[in-house]
Amino acid sequence: MAERPKWNDAMRLTAYYNCRSQKPHFAFLRFPKRVLEVQLQVGPDNLLSACDESVRYKIRRAQREGVTSEIESDQETFRSFYNIFADSKGLEELDSRQLNFYWSSLIVTKAMHQGAPLAMHAYMVDAKADRATLLYSCSHFRNAEDSKTRNFLGNASRFLYWDDMRRFSDLGIKTFDFGYFGNEDQISQVNQFKKGYPCEEKNVSTYISLPLYFFMRLTRKNPTF
């Protein structure tokens, strides 16, 4: 999450996410992306007011029903929770070796109710850039047996996004980055969900060093960049 990759990182296992540069850089592979950003300087109350009416209702409903948030500090707890979600959607499970590379740079939040986790979000946080970027979002929505439970989990997820914005705003972070989005049908549904918050679209680049690119090719079946 820098303006551009540094040349002395080219021979390391290095990834630069959401760079403003749109140009190629030596020994890095560039992947053009679009992101949805929320500016946090206005404060959590104003952010909530700027959300769509249905999103505000669901956030407040989750609060009334006793949903709270916490930080998850255990890597394996997060990975296990995410992999249940991945299995339910037919996604590749999260590899512990890859997660090890950037776990120390992550902040993982979770929505809780009566001691049980409902949803988790993992963010790459760059204090120098005043930016928090969503890398992973997971809940067990698809494993719910009835519509009431699914609605409850959906409300909890919406609450957690807003509460994450509040948390990062309190830490002095200026930009909340929802991560990449595209035009595929499945992603489009997620885009509509995210656009219930006061987002702006931005063009960015991800740069992957050649050593990291080949490492991910060797260790993952279908790596995404």
Image (tube, helix red, strand yellow):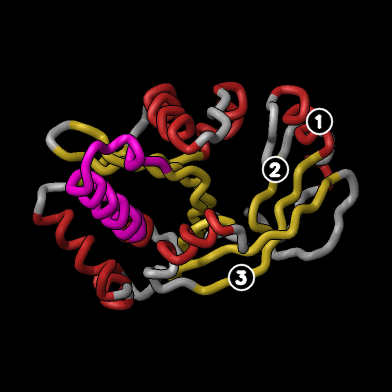
Residue 202 tag number:
3
In this orientation, which residue lies closer to the viewer: 60 or 153?
Answer: 153
Q: Is residue 159 magenta?
A: yes
Q: Quadrant of residue 149?
A: top left
**Quick one: label 3 or label 1, which is nearer the N terminus?**
3
Compared to residue 35, the image places residue 218 above or below, namely: above
- What amino acid is found at the position of numbered circle 2 in the picture? Ala
Residue drawn where x is 50% and y is 60% of the image:
177
Instruction: Classify residue 19 as left or right of residue 99.
Output: right
- What amino acid is found at the position of numbered circle 3 in the picture? Lys
- Residue highlighted by disc 2: 15
Compared to residue 180, the image places residue 123 above or below, namely: above
Instruction: Classify residue 143 as left or right of residue 114.
Output: right
Q: Quadrant of residue 185?
A: bottom right
- Magenta extent: 138-165
Residue farthest front in this picture:
146
Residue drawn where x is 27% and y is 39% of the image:
118
